[in-house]
Image (tube, rainbow, N blue to C red):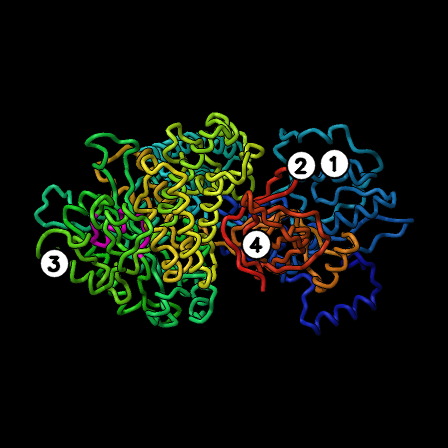
Amino acid sequence: MKLFGILFSAPQIFYLFLLLYIAGIELNPGPFPCKSCAAVPETISCNIRHQHLHSVSRNFLYHCPAPSCIFSTKSFNFMNKHVSMFHSETSHIDPEATNTIGCVCESGGIPCAYSTTSFWELVQHLCTHLDSDVEVGCPILGCEYPNSFRKKSTFRVHLSQYHPNWRDEGCPKQHLRRNQENLNGGYLGPNCDEAMDTEDGGANISPDSNQNMFDDAAVIDCIAKFYLQLYGLHTLPFETIQDICNGIICMTEVIHAKMNQVLTEELEKLNIPQDQINLIRYKVMQADLLYASHHKDNSPGPYLSSDYYRREYFMKYFGFCSPKEMHLDEDDHDNHLRQEIIPITPTLLRLFQDPVICKDIDDSFLKQADPSNDIVSDYTEGLQFISENHPSKEIHIFVYQDTVNAVMNALGSAKNKHKLLTMYFTVGNLKSHRRAKVESKHLMMIMRESVFKEVKAPKSLEEVMKELKSLETEGILYKGENVSVAVVFIQGDNLGQHLIGGFIESFSTKFFCRFCEILRAHFKANPTSTSRLRTKADYTRCALRAMVMEKPIKGIKAGCEFNDLKYFHATTHLAPCLAHDLFEGVVSWDLAGIISNLIRDKWFSRKWLNKKIKAFKCVGADSPNKPAFVEKKGLKLGGHAVQNWTLLRLLPFILGDKIADVEHSSWKLYLQLKEITESFTPPSFYKSDMPYAQDVLLPAYFERRAEVLDIEKYPLNPKHHFLYAHYAFLMCLLGPLIHLWTLPYEQRHKFFKHLLRLSQNFINPEHSCAYRYLLHVTYMSSDGPTFQEECVEVSSKQMTPDLYSAKLANIVSSSFQEPGWRDCTSVCFDGLQYKKEDVLLLSENQGNILTGTVKVIAVKDNVLSFICELNEATFDSSLGIHTMPEPSGNLKCISFNELRYPVPHPIYFFRGRLSFSLKHKLLRSN
């Protein structure tokens, strides 16, 4: 008997099965249940074909159904390739099949004794006879093809064209062997390559024995999800969706009329009584669930032909809930003063069902910050959080507020008429890279900004504060345990932070800083001057005086509602935003001034620079944020925050040989600005480095700035003060500021802008946005977990040392001794894409950077490792970039969990060498 591609004798087979039985190992374990529904396909191949039905879902991954194999991929073809490579012996076998099918071939007059329960295995066996020049016939019962076959190619063509479902697994009753008399000598007829003639009523068509793995409820679920996708993902207007629905109703009615006509005619030819014909027609029509779900009289189940019925279905089966509308004034007869609330508690309970989120939360419960540790990697290691003595088990919340203009490019009186104030939250217990994703941002309140200002913060935030206080004192149920919920930070731009914090919403007033009490006149006279930091006692005293005197006191016009929470206070928990302060503020103004100076000194023209920017090809992570053109006026850069950051980093590569004098004062100022941004943007930093940034880097920069830039054309702004006076302290107080910037939240605004632009309905935009947002969330959560941790491979092969050069083979042999490791061309892991020859940044050593060029990507059981070629890139202080040396040949195996900076860094070819420009400073080598 042939097993696993090896020929065994009968005694060997007996002992092999005995050993497998003793070890508790099944030869063909099955059946193979679907991970996405309740279907239970019988074989691996049937399971994969069934998974293809689910592939319309967002971010769907094919999972290998073979036991102990956790391979997954987004590609149906690649999953088939994987099964062919690693599970070919068992992919078409139904372990529960009992009916056998035997081979009827003869060799030398001796009948073949082979039999199996798998039709696929029988075909493979018949191919071995063809290799031995033995003729075979079609083994499918009822096939009227008269000739036998001499070649595998013609045999397979016949099966594929005449019996497209020949791979049906197991041994169905209709797949019995053919009689010996049907085996005639001959050749494959000339019509083999033509499509089958169906005039004979389909007698030669092999019946499709594939079981329908979707029951009626699952089919209706797919139809409802289609509508949910139109509502929540494509944000089509309600009228458009109803037009689509009406079109489906019309088309199904026409199709059913034709089907009824054909059925009646054909059944009457068979002399079937009319009452039975009517019954057959009724059952056939009811089997069409697309028709039934859109015609109430014929629908045995849910009905989806109106917005009301669809919404009811979404609420019952997908967990959709409508937003809560709050009226803020009982005397408001026009119903103008209102807001939409999305309760936090149901959102948190839904998030707690996500295994990836739960894993991050559990890990955060075990994390203990060490105040003596010099490295700060997250907010929990900041001085403020440590001083507050939070319990180890606590759900942390970051609140974000901002305004979004519903009308694009509105002018005059319409400019702020429909401006919406939105409030989101993020679970702070998530790992920092997951907090940075837009999927982690959840809407909690939306209302018109004009209404917020009219009814004031206490009334506007009453419902939100009520729930936050309840969560803080009573907690929320997490894994059977009551856990408290605490607001850790409020995030936003400066204007929004002043609005929430009770500060004056103007930065041209006497007191413009929410962190200290510096006077604007003192700042103008001496930009490097500082003042006393605001304290809780001072804030409370000023807020009370402002309320009594009805005028601002030291820049404070009212108290902050969030101060009533246990840990929060407006003087310490209103986080700054790097994107607004640094990249859209300091970098935008100062780099524009530096470029203007270089243009003035004839290094290049503005036209030439914009032409080079247009032609420059960004790579890797820089590609989505190619620098914008420099504006003609030259007062500021023309891009958004990350575009400005990219231009700052890549300016040496763009200018190339136009860098005429590296000792030029403006170029020196550029290098200082670049170093400052690298100091304040790392995801991890040393607390001991902050005094150097505060006492050396910043004073030196502002001193040179005063000499280089025209103070009249490029004046200092409050954002310069935030950078100089507070950023170094805030880094130590709050943790890495890059984790607290607001850009991921602002990605959420795109959804609302797109929605309102499509609907063109501004009667009640806050309700439209909240309602469609919840439909969007319902659709996204209906497809499984929010975050995917699976390792998605592309073009993998079994890892064996003989595939590599001698050096690589040695490290492969020593590092991957266990079987099952696969070598991938590229892989997507935890949302990050890796491919061979990517460069990873490992650590810093006296200005030089240790890099690892990926040579091998190894994956096993959702564990990712790399074999990297180590090189030390040298720092060119005159250009602010790092240059990579010739390949060293020094190889090292590095697991994904060892990477401090897991994102591959963009590499550029500059002056004949591979070079790169840092985004931030790196931690030093141990």
Q: CA distance from mark 2 to mark 4?
A: 76 Å
| Residue drawn at point x = 45 percent, y = 55 percent | 434
**Residue beneath disc 2:** 204
Q: Is residue 497 magenta?
A: yes
Marking on residue 847:
4
Residue 750 image offset from top left, x and y in percent: 36, 40
**Residue beneath disc 3:** 545
Q: CA distance from mark 2 to mark 1?
A: 9 Å
The answer to whether 745 is drawn above or below residue 263 in the figure is below
Q: Amino acid at mark 1?
A: Tyr
Q: Which residues are magenta?
A: 490-504
Q: Amino acid at mark 4?
A: Gly
Secondary structure found at label 3: helix
Between marks 3 and 4 in the image, the one whose residue lies nearer the viewer: 4
Q: Is residue 568 magenta?
A: no
Residues under numbered marks 2 and 1 in contact, where contact means CB atoms less than 8 Å apart: yes
Residues under numbered marks 1 and 4 in contact, where contact means CB atoms less than 8 Å apart: no
Structural crowding at the residue carrying mark 1, measured as other residues with C-alpha within 10 Å and reported as few (<14), some (14–19) or many (≥20): some
Residue 847 image offset from top left, x and y in percent: 57, 54
Q: Amino acid at mark 2?
A: Asn
Residues under numbered marks 2 and 3 in contact, where contact means CB atoms less than 8 Å apart: no
**Residue beneath disc 1:** 145
